[in-house]
Image (cartoon, rainbow, N blue to C red):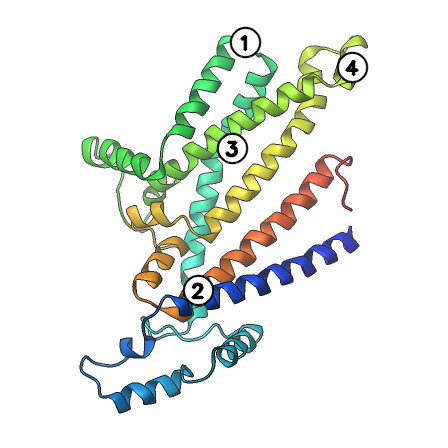
Amino acid sequence: MLKYIGKRLLQTLLVLFIVSIFAFALIHMAGGNPALLLLPDGASDEAIKAMEHELGLDQPLYIQYIQYMIGVFQGDLGMSTAYKIPVADIIAERLPYSIKLTMGTVLVGCSLCIPLGIIAGSNRGKPVDFFAMFFALLGNSMSAVWLAVLNVFVFSVWLGWLPSMGAESFSNIILPALTLGYPMAAEITRVGRSGMIDTLSEDYITATYAKGISRRVVNWKYAFKNALIPIITLVGMSIGSYLAGAVVVETVFAWPGIGQLTNQAVGNRDYQLVQSLLLVSAALFTLINLVVDIINSLVDPRVSLE
C-alpha cells in the first residue's frame, strides 16, 4: 500500500508539473498586459516599463516560469494584480466555501440515491426500477444553467422560501447544493442500478442463492459491496470537480467559492491568480483520485494496486 501511494504521489507531481506548464503558456497566449491593470489610465510608457520590470514581465518566459515555480515550492503563489493581495490568501479565503458547497452537494446526491439505485437494480423491471430510471433520465437531461434558473424561480421568486444569492447563512447553500446535487444523484442512481444488475449476474451470487441464503442478505451483504465501487469512483470524481470550482452554479448564486473566483480572475486578466487556481484545482483533483483508489482497494480486495 505504501509503495503504491508513493508511486501515485510521484505521478501526481508529474501531472501538476505538466498542468503548470500548460497553465502558464495558455495564460500568456491570452494577451493583455497585467501591468496596465496596476496603473492609472493614461500612464506613460516609462511607468508601464517600470511596472513590467517590477512584476518581472520583461524577463523571458522561461525565466518567468522558473521564478513562478520557485515561489510555488516556497508557498508563494504570487500577487494578484486585481486584488493587490497574495494569491494564496485569496484562495485560502474562498476554498472553504467550495468545500461547504461540495459537502452539501454530496449529501444531496448520496443520501437517498445510493439506496434507490441499489433497490432498483435488485428489482429490475418493477415499478421502483422504472421510477429510478425516470429520475435518472430527467436529472441527466437538465443543464446546470437551466436547473439553477428553475430553482431560483420556484424556491426564491415564486415561493419565497430560500435566498437566491450570497453565503451568509445555512439557507444560502440549499439552492446551489440542490442544483449540483440533482444531476449527481441521477448519475449515482444510474450507476448504482447498473452495478447492482451486473453484480447479481455473477456466478458467485448464484452460488450464494443456491446455499439457501435469503435474497435480502445476498443483496445487501454480498452484492451491495461490489456494486458500491463504481459509485465511490463517481462520487470521488464529482468531489474533485466541485472542489476545483463549479463555475456556472457559483456564479449564478453569487457563491464566493473557487468557481466564481476563477470566473472573476479570467475576466480581470489576473494572470497569477488564474494559473494558481488551475494548479490548485489540479492538485485537489489528483489528490481525490488517489483517495478514491485507496478506498476502492479497501472495499474490494480484488482491486489490484499494481
**Which residue in the structure is indicated by mark 4?**
208
Marks 2/4: CA–CA distance: 56 Å
Amino acid type, residue under disc 1 in the picture: Gly
Amino acid type, residue under disc 2 in the picture: Leu
Q: Secondary structure at mark 4?
A: helix
Say above or below: 141 vs 260.
above
**Which residue in the structure is indicated by mark 1?**
125
Of badges 1 and 4, the one in the foreground is: 1
Earlier sequence position, callout 1 versus callout 4: 1
Residue 34: image x %, image y %?
33, 75
Marks 4/3: CA–CA distance: 28 Å
Q: Quadrant of residue 47?
A: bottom left
**Which residue in the structure is indicated by mark 2?**
26
**Which residue in the structure is indicated by mark 3?**
110
Earlier sequence position, callout 1 versus callout 3: 3
The local crowd at label 4, few if under 14, some if 14 to 19, many if 20 or more residues have their Cα within 10 Å, is some
The answer to whether the residue labelled 2 contacts the one labelled 1, judged by CB atoms less than 8 Å apart, is no
Amino acid type, residue under disc 4 in the picture: Thr
Q: Quadrant of residue 274?
A: bottom left
